[in-house]
């Protein structure tokens, strides 16, 4: 009976001297993973979990219960609990325990999301001739930030009753009542114990319910399964209707991601419930930082393994790190998706004083009414900043006297975490009227800049600088962004899309497929920026495109296994026109 561990004895000893009670006994949240289901009654599993916990809490059932966060007992077995390192290693040695690992945080796979706030957009969507007949029987689970159920993308108009297969529920909570679920959003749950245990609990968590405050979950769900919505357009940037890949499929919401990310113990609880609830496909637009841990210590690998073995296809995003070997969600039983471009761009014209016109990526909706002087930002360096530093248009690096009324050519370092949107604000504050941003890496990601602006690549940037250098009075004018269809070459792999090789199992290639993930318009949460729709980029957006395709296949071939669906997509994959 190791009722008082050495650690705690040491603690008592320390407490006497430095009055630091609780120094060693600080506990962390761990996942105790116990493999596949034993077939025991779920209630017995719970008491077994408590029993195991009590044995490391000196036999105290109360302490065991207080430390317990979740029991996993539907799709697989295990539990989550607050443990000291000592208790965790004791449990790891117990029979039946496969692995014990700490509750790590995972991140949503949207690129530089701060760059994308503040814009409503639109895209014209072609409707291919898919029969929607059996889609109503396919249930897609989204492990994400929740949903904005009132969005027209999630209307249940003309949908038949919920399929009898469905065993999930509509969990009520803040701003989420029974009528928030319908025949489209047939179920919704939320998980926050793991997040609350790790993050500063005084921070307000918005919508303690399945309601989406960030927009990400509504965006991904509508890409895969949004209803057809007419008249999505924003100040003429584009006009038309939009829909998801499988607009008649059912949506089940598993909200596990909060303000700063998603924790393992919450993710596992979502997988466990989704397997029992009867989803056919799970869409997971999030993942670990690269390099990812091995399969036995990664909640998404474990959860998706048991999902796949119960016939649930798990589609996941590969990540946005962009570099070689940075691919995540590597398990062979998942379908892992990289991001590509489409033949559609959002671009602004940059017209130089010598009448040459260049086109750069942009979502800015204001335009210059007249030509203005164009200078390299290094010429407007201020104070202690060197011209080189100022060429990156860093905060307070620009001299207002020199920048006022001008178009500035700024740089963006490759793999920099600086916000491009922020650079347009810095130029604006310095009195600039426009910005040309030279970005060698990510020139394709369209951004709703604060002033007329456009992102160009290295080659175009060199031409513009050479024009400035060789012209006595260089001038330029930047137009508002417009939709450009038929842009070539398309598709290309987006520069931010994480790449192989597979760092855990090199003989298995990852990602499995690529799908559009650049500048995707879909539903949004009005809680963020008061917008119904937004344009985002990331493998977060490409993942639900494949979820939508998989749903169409499942509708036509209900008996196909996850591997059969994955194989069908991988062996027939070619460029998919936008839905
Ligand atoms: C549920 O919430 C909606 C909107 O938040 C509200 O209009 C409706 O009256 C509520 N229904 C019930 C039964 O409370
Ligand atoms: C261009 O003119 C329009 C209409 O006169 C005005 O609303 C807009 O603010 C002007 N744009 C700039 C950048 O000055
Ligand atoms: C900005 O440029 C003006 C004119 O060249 C100069 O007089 C002033 O000192 C500069 N200000 C700063 C903060 O560098
Ligand atoms: C233009 O001139 C700047 C310095 O004035 C120099 O750094 C840059 O390399 C030149 N660029 C081109 C394309 O000539
Ligand atoms: C204008 O300047 C650009 C950049 O230097 C150059 O590529 C282009 O040929 C010039 N156009 C004319 C008409 O001189």
Image: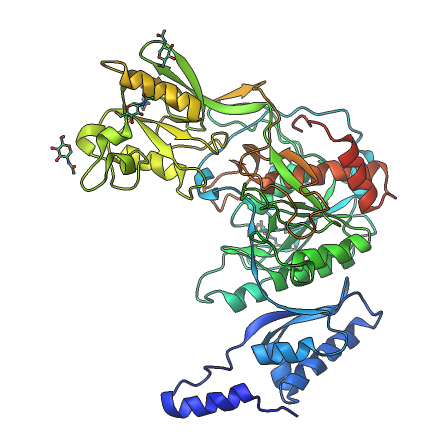
Answer left or right for 104 relative to 460: right
Q: Is residue 506 above or below residue 567?
A: below
Please provide percent x and percent y for residue 75. 77, 61
Name, please, the residue furthest toward the front: 507
Please provide percent x and percent y for residue 68. 63, 75
Residue placed at 37% from the left, 87% from the top?
A: 18
- Where does ligand 3 appear, by image quarter? top left
Image quarter where the N terminus lies is bottom right
Q: Residue 248: in sight, yes or no?
A: no
* Colour convention of the picture: rainbow
Q: Residue 377: in sight, yes or no?
A: yes
Label tally: 0
Is 144 in front, or is 490? 490
Name, please, the residue furthest toward the top: 355
Is 574 in front, or is 70? 574
Image quarter where the C terminus lies is top right
Please provide percent x and percent y for residue 331. 71, 51
Please provide percent x and percent y for residue 309. 81, 55
Is 554 in front, or is 417? 417
Is 214 in front, or is 101? 101
Residue placed at 81% from the left, 36% from the top?
A: 568
Residue placed at 45% from the left, 31% from the top?
A: 440
Give the quadrant of residue 552. top right
């Amino acid at each position: 009976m190791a009722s008082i561990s050495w650690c705690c004895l040491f603690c008592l000893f320390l407490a006497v001297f430095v009055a630091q009670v609780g120094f060693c006994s600080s506990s962390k949240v761990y996942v105790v993973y116990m493999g596949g289901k034993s077939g025991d009654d779920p209630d017995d599993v719970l008491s077994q979990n408590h029993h195991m916990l009590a044995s490391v809490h000196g036999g105290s059932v109360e302490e065991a219960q207080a430390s317990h966060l979740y029991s996993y007992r539907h799709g697989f077995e295990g539990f989550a609990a607050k443990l000291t390192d000592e208790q965790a290693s004791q449990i790891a040695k117990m029979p039946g325990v496969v692995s014990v690992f700490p509750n790590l945080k995972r991140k949503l796979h949207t690129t530089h999301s701060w760059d994308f706030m503040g814009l409503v957009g639109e895209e014209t969507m072609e409707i291919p001739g898919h029969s929607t007949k059996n889609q109503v029987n396919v249930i897609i689970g989204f492990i994400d930030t929740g949903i904005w159920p009132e969005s027209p993308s999630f209307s249940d108009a003309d949908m038949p009753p919920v399929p009898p297969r469905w065993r999930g529920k509509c969990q009520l909570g803040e701003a989420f009542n029974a009528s928030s679920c319908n025949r489209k959003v047939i179920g919704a749950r939320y998980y926050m114990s793991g997040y609350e245990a790790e993050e500063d609990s005084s921070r307000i968590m918005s919508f303690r319910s399945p309601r989406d405050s960030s927009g990400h979950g509504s965006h991904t769900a509508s890409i895969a399964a949004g209803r057809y919505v007419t008249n999505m357009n924003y100040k003429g940037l584009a006009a038309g209707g939009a829909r998801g890949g499988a607009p008649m499929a059912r949506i089940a919401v598993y909200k596990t991601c909060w303000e700063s990310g998603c924790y393992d113990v919450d993710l596992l609880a979502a997988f466990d419930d989704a397997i029992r609830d009867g989803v056919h496909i799970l869409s997971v637009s999030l993942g670990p930082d690269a390099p990812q841990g091995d399969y036995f210590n990664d909640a998404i690998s474990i959860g998706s393994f048991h999902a796949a073995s119960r016939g649930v296809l798990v589609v996941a995003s590969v990540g946005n790190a962009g570099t070689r070997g940075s691919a995540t969600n590597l398990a062979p039983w998942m379908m892992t998706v990289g991001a590509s471009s489409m033949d559609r761009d959002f671009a602004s014209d940059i017209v130089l004083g010598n009448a040459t016109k260049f086109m750069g990526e942009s979502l800015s909706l204001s335009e210059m009414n007249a030509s203005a002087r164009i200078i390299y930002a290094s010429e407007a360096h201020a104070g202690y900043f060197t011209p080189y530093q100022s060429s990156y248009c860093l905060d307070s690096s620009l001299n207002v006297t020199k920048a006022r009324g001008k178009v500035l050519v700024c740089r963006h370092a490759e793999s920099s975490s600086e916000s491009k949107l922020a650079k347009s604000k810095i130029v604006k504050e310095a009195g600039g009227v426009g910005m040309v941003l030279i970005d060698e890496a990510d020139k394709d990601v369209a951004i709703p800049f604060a002033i007329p602006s456009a992102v160009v690549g290295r080659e175009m940037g060199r031409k513009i600088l050479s024009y400035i250098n060789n012209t006595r009075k260089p001038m330029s004018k930047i137009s508002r962004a417009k939709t450009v269809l038929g842009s070539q070459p398309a598709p290309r792999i987006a520069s931010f899309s994480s790449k192989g090789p597979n760092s855990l199992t090199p003989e298995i290639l990852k990602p499995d497929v690529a799908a559009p993930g650049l500048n995707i318009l879909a539903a949004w949460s009005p809680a963020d920026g008061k917008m119904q729709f937004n344009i985002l980029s990331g493998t977060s957006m490409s993942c639900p495109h494949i979820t939508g395709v998989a749903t169409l296949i499942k509708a036509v071939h209900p008996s196909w296994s996850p591997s059969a669906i994955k194989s069908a997509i991988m062996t027939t994959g070619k460029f998919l026109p936008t839905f």
